[in-house]
Image (spheres, rainbow, N blue to C red):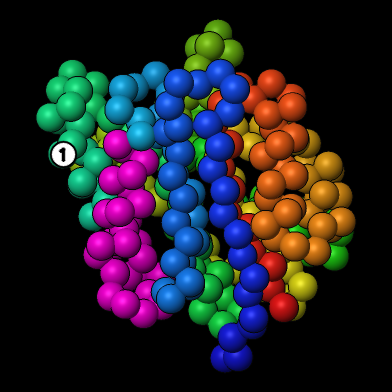
Amino acid sequence: MRTMKVRHAALSDIGLMRKENEDRFLLDEGRNLFGVADGIGGLPHGAEAAALAVEGVSSRLAPRTPSLEELKAAVKGANTDVRQAGHRLNPLHGIGSTLTLGCLMGRQLNLVHAGDSRCYVWRRGRITQATIDHNVEHDPHFTLRFGMSEAVFERQRSALTRCLGQLEEVELECHKLELEQGDRVLFATDGLFRAIPEEELAERLGNQEEPELALRELVTLANERGGADNATGVLLYLE
């Protein structure tokens, strides 16, 4: 399986309204591992949760490109790290973080995901969301299992249904995506993508040939539109 050349960039910005940046990113070129984590709003110690999520994965992997099964096992171990820290830092409610990771193996992207951060794939001018938002509004596993009255749905539609740190066993979303030369892959926290509609996101990724400049433009745009949250992205250009 021939490995494509990858150019990449990562950027995290506190935004204009938050006192602390509770996002983290992972860019490990040696292991072809990329992703983002976002400490859960409404719970304390979000920065610690996101950092533990990223560090917990990285520390459990061998110094080579991991398989999907190895990546899943590392994420489950990171879930334990965040959960144990929650018992200490916030015994009543714990702490939590999203985590969206991708590992490149040749032309295949192995994805492991929990929460409402996102992975997008841009291809020939069109953009596709490769992950599901794990919240009440969009997670089909949750609504099939528990149902939801209309009144509760309206109040809780953005509440997370999956994340790291809240449950002993985290239910992960996993995919194997086949990529093509020319694809562009974006991992992003909600402070970035909620400020930029998908059509505009596709246009801006297509117009900029340098991943670092493209990512900086996106973060700047999120701040120009209010900067209500931390904005973090990891961007890959496959050649």
Q: Do we see residue 70 in this rendering? A: yes
> Magenta stretch containing residue 101, yes or no?
no
> Magenta stretch containing residue 71, yes or no?
yes
**Foreground of the two, 227 or 145:** 227
Question: x, y (%) of residue 174?
Answer: 47, 59
**Relative to 74, residue 190 above or below:** above
Q: Which element type, helix, strand or loop, lies under badge 1? A: helix
Q: Do we see residue 121 in this rendering? A: no
Tell me the kind of residue under disc 1: Gln
- Splitting the image into 4 quarters, where does residue 121 fall? bottom right
Query: Which residue bears the numbered disc 1?
Result: 84
**Foreground of the two, 220 or 205:** 220
Question: x, y (%) of residue 65?
Answer: 41, 77
Q: Magenta stretch: give its range.
A: 48-76
**Foreground of the two, 223 or 132:** 223
Question: x, y (%) of residue 31?
Answer: 42, 74
**Foreground of the two, 94 or 59:** 59
Which part of the image, by quadrant, shows the N terminus?
bottom right
**Relative to 155, residue 132 above or below:** below
Q: Residues within 10 Å of mark 1 (few under 14, many from 20)?
A: some
